[in-house]
Image: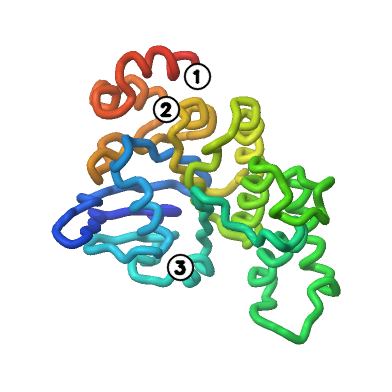
Amino acid sequence: MSYALELKDLRKSFGKTEIIRGANLAVNAGERVAIIGPNGAGKSTLFNLISGRFGPTSGEILLNGQSIAHKKPYEINRMGLSRSFQITNIFPKLSVVENLRCAVLWSLGYKYSFLKFLSNLRDANEQAEKFLAMIKLDKKRDVLAMNLTYAEQRALEIGVTIAGGSDVILLDEPTAGMSKSETTRFISLIKSVTEGKTLLTVEHDMGVVFGLADKIAVVVYGEVIAYDVPEAVRANAKVQEAYLGSAVADSQVGGH
């Protein structure tokens, strides 16, 4: 069986320090998976390995059955995987719609061309407008990205991430720094824009995790110690001891 994303005995060392210690994970197409764990567990390193920022020391990473373990980030992106970052990563001096238009160019086959005026590319403009509506920034269409609110910038980054046409999306702490009301709206936004896609997200907010994920992967000391549906992870004593804590599990998770 070919998974959308699969990690096999994945390991990453920096010098003599082993950060990822034989991680295994198999994600089906269309699943939404939250990756949780204590600070220093290796979650960001895992994302960097999957997206090609780091190469693994050993082990395998498969995207739709194809190895991506030692490919460059842009090669992985062209194979169908996109990611966002903890720190918002957009073009601040371009407008909202221009950011989205840049994001759709490669998937439409334009690649690099300095002989075309982007405003004349009808299909690129139509695609940009479609994603503009999806992320609900229609009214901010011509506003420079740097003048958006923080939550709007995060929404734009997610729009840029999905606009390239990738089937596998990685979101790194997408709701970090948001208010409770912004977070609630953002969960709905993420659900709608990733419909039918495979989603992996690193997230600390348990409300987001249990409100968004089909499955949860718990990473502790560079290993996936649990991977299951939210209810099973919530009831896992090993997970509660390692990360959630009984009090947190009862108070924060019990109502979801």
Residue 220, by quadrant, is top left
The residue that label 3 is drawn on is 73
The residue that label 2 is drawn on is 230
The answer to whether 191 appears left or right of 95 in the picture is left
Tell which tag, 2 or 3, sits nearer the viewer.
3
Which mark is first along the chain, 1 or 3? 3
- Where is residue 191? Give x, y as percent: 61, 38
| Residue at 22 percent of width and 63 percent of height | 58
Q: Is residue 169 visible?
A: no
Residue 2, by quadrant, is bottom left
Label 1, label 2: how far apart the Cα atoms are: 9 Å
The answer to whether 28 appears left or right of 247 in the picture is right
Amino acid carrying mark 2 in the image? Pro
Q: Secondary structure at mark 1?
A: loop
The residue that label 1 is drawn on is 256
Question: Crowdedness of circle 3 by 10 Å Cα count: few (<14), some, many (20+)?
Answer: many
